[in-house]
Structure formats: structure tokens, C-alpha cells
């Protein structure tokens, strides 16, 4: 059974206020984020580990070159957006990886957003101290 693979695949991922545009192509495993290396852009080891989770689940370490453009939000949201974008790009490149990525939960968009601040109180849920007298 022969499968036709695309030369390059593209996908987007979102989390909180962050949007990641991800291009995936066969290569030697380099990951570039906004023109910087992965470990240079995401200084914390946990954030770069989050980004690499879908590649490890697909047994593709060292097989793909990834170029990502990320904007909006903070580093945590950006790493989550990249994780979703990489998982979607892997499926666009090779549809047989879908079951392993779905089982790992990498295809679900994390829909949690920051709750808005309400008037008359200091935050979304926090209240000023109640005074009985």
C-alpha cells in the first residue's frame, strides 16, 4: 500500500489569545519559532516539551522541520497554540496519524478563555471585603 505525502503542510492552532501558524515539512527535526530556535523562544523547558508532545506521539522525532509564526497572548498560550497547530499539520501531512494524536488529546482546541472583570468588584470573581456594620 503506497501513500502519497504532500511536500509541505500548513495548519493553524489557537489557545487563549494566541494564534500559531505552523508549516511542517520532512527534514531533520529543527523547530523554528518567529525566526528563533525552539529553546531560544520558549525559555522554560516545560513550554518546549508541550510543543514537542504531538511529534513524540506520532513517533516523528527528527523527521520533520517545523516553522511557526506565533502572535498574541503569553508564552503559555503560544505553546498550547503551537501544539494544536503541529498536531493539525501532522494530520494534513499524513492522515494515518489521526488516531494516535486523537488518543493523546492533541486535536482538541482548549476553549478556556479569561473571564471578564465585572463592575463594582476588583476582578472577575473576587469581591471587596463585606462589612456587616
Image (cartoon, grey):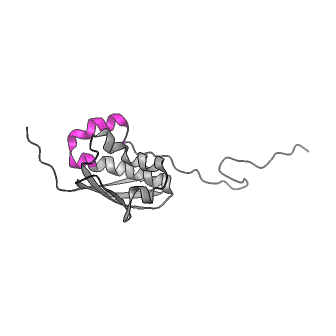
Q: Pinpoint residue 84: horizontal percent, then vertical percent.
A: 37, 48
- At a point 64% along the width and 54% down the height, the residue shown is 117
Considering the whole magenta stretch, tell me its main secondary structure.
Answer: helix
Classify residue 54 by image quadrant.
Answer: top left
Classify residue 66 by image quadrant.
Answer: bottom left
- At a point 91% along the width and 45% down the height, the residue shown is 133
Question: Quadrant location of the N terminus?
Answer: top left
Q: Pinpoint residue 118: horizontal percent, then vertical percent.
A: 66, 53
Relative to 23, is 45 on the left or the right?
Answer: right
Q: Pinpoint residue 29: horizontal percent, then vertical percent.
A: 28, 52
Q: Is residue 9 magenta?
A: no
Relative to 125, is 13 on the left or the right?
Answer: left
Q: Which residues are magenta?
A: 90-108
**Does any portion of residue 16 appear in the rendered image?**
no
Q: Is residue 101 magenta?
A: yes
Q: Pinpoint residue 129: horizontal percent, then vertical percent.
A: 80, 47
The one nearer the camera, 100 or 62, is 62
Relative to 104, is 93 on the left or the right?
Answer: left
The one nearer the camera, 116 or 40, is 40
Relative to 65, is 14 on the left or the right?
Answer: right
The one nearer the camera, 113 or 53, is 53
Amino acid at each position: 500500500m503506497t501513500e502519497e505525502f504532500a511536500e509541505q503542510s500548513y495548519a493553524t492552532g489557537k489557545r487563549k489569545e494566541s494564534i500559531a501558524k505552523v508549516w511542517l515539512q520532512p527534514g531533520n527535526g529543527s523547530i523554528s519559532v518567529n525566526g528563533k530556535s525552539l529553546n531560544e523562544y520558549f525559555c522554560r523547558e516545560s513550554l518546549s516539551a508541550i510543543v514537542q508532545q504531538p511529534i513524540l506521539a506520532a513517533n516523528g522525532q527528527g523527521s520533520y522541520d517545523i516553522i511557526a509564526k506565533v502572535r498574541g497572548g503569553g508564552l503559555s498560550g503560544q505553546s498550547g497554540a503551537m501544539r494544536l497547530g503541529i498536531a493539525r499539520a501532522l494530520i494534513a501531512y499524513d492522515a494515518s496519524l489521526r488516531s494516535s494524536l486523537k488518543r493523546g488529546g492533541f486535536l482538541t482546541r482548549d476553549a478556556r478563555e479569561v473571564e471578564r472583570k465585572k463592575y463594582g468588584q476588583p476582578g472577575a470573581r473576587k469581591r471587596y471585603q463585606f462589612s456587616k456594620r
